[in-house]
Structure formats: C-alpha cells, structure tokens
C-alpha cells in the first residue's frame, strides 16, 4: 500500500515511544500469556489472522480496550498489515495507561512470511 507522506510522518513521530517485537518474539510471548491483538479492518481480519489473536480494529480499540482488557498491566502485542497502524494504536493505549504494550514489527506481512500459524474465518 502506498502511504501518504503525512501518514508516514505521523508514524515516525510515535515510533520513539513504541517498542517493537519480532514475529518470533511475538510467538514466544503469546505462548507465555501475552494477548495478541489484530487492529486491522474487519475484512482484513476475516481473510486471515494470526492464530489466537483477538480482533479490535484500529477504529475502535481505544473505545473498547478497557471493557475487554481492564488490566492495564497486561502484556499486549498489537499488529496490523505492516506495523504502522499498530504503532499508532500502541502509542494511544500507552497514553490511556496501558504499561506493557508492544507493536509487532512488519505486521501481518511479516507473520505470513515467517510462516507463523494463521486462522481464517469461514462463513
């Protein structure tokens, strides 16, 4: 996807405040109890997602997170298509008081390239 210059600048602004983890680290941390959250759009989620992930789209995560995961110390790993939207969401969750939020570098693209386990929603 072609990202606008403005969007890329916004992401660059938040990146110093966001910790990124690799796919391998994500798999390990998820196995140890971290919650993996897919922040992509509904249609992206339905086409396929990381096994064991929950879905809270970028448009609603800030609204819904406290109801779904009230423990602000919980380890949360966010991912999107390539790592930009998850970084923006991670920054906002940190501003909301979540203290252990990470963004998976490379997002869904990196997950698939690593041949990590996936699930597909069948209708």
Image (cartoon, rainbow, N blue to C red):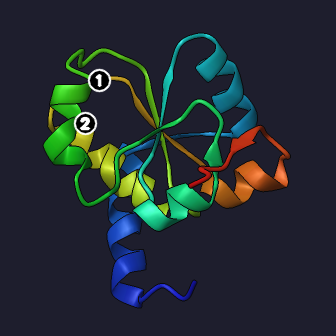
Residue drawn at 32 percent across, 71 percent down = 10
Q: Mark 1 falls on what kind of element? A: loop
Q: Can see residue 83?
A: no
- Give how far across and how far down residue 30 sits, in percent: 60, 22
Q: Residue furthest top?
A: 32
Tell me the quadrant of the picture where the C terminus can be found. Answer: bottom right
Q: Mark 2 falls on what kind of element? A: helix
Q: Is residue 67 above or below residue 85?
A: above
Q: CA distance from mark 1 to mark 2?
A: 6 Å
Residue drawn at 36 percent across, 79 percent down = 7
Q: How many marks?
A: 2
- Give how far across and how far down residue 67 sits, in percent: 16, 28
Q: Is residue 71 above or below residue 49?
A: above
Which residue position holds label 1? Answer: 99
N-terminal-most mark, 1 or 2? 2
Which residue position holds label 2? Answer: 94
Residue 102 shown left or right of residue 6 in the figure: right
Tell me the quadrant of the picture where the N terminus can be found. Answer: bottom right
- Give how far across and how far down residue 35 sits, in percent: 47, 25
Q: Is residue 102 above or below residue 39?
A: above
């Amino acid at each position: 996807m072609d990202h606008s210059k403005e969007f890329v600048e916004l992401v660059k602004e938040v990146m110093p405040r966001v910790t990124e983890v690799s796919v391998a680290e994500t798999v390990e941390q998820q196995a140890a109890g971290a919650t993996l959250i897919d922040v992509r759009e509904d249609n992206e989620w339905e086409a396929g997602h990381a096994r064991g992930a929950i879905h809270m789209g970028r448009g609603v995560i800030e609204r819904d997170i406290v109801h779904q995961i009230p423990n602000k110390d919980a380890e949360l790993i966010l991912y999107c298509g390539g790592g930009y939207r998850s970084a923006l969401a991670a920054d906002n969750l940190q501003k909301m008081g979540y203290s252990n939020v990470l963004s998976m570098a490379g997002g869904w693209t990196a997950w698939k390239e690593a041949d990590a386990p996936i699930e597909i929603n069948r209708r």
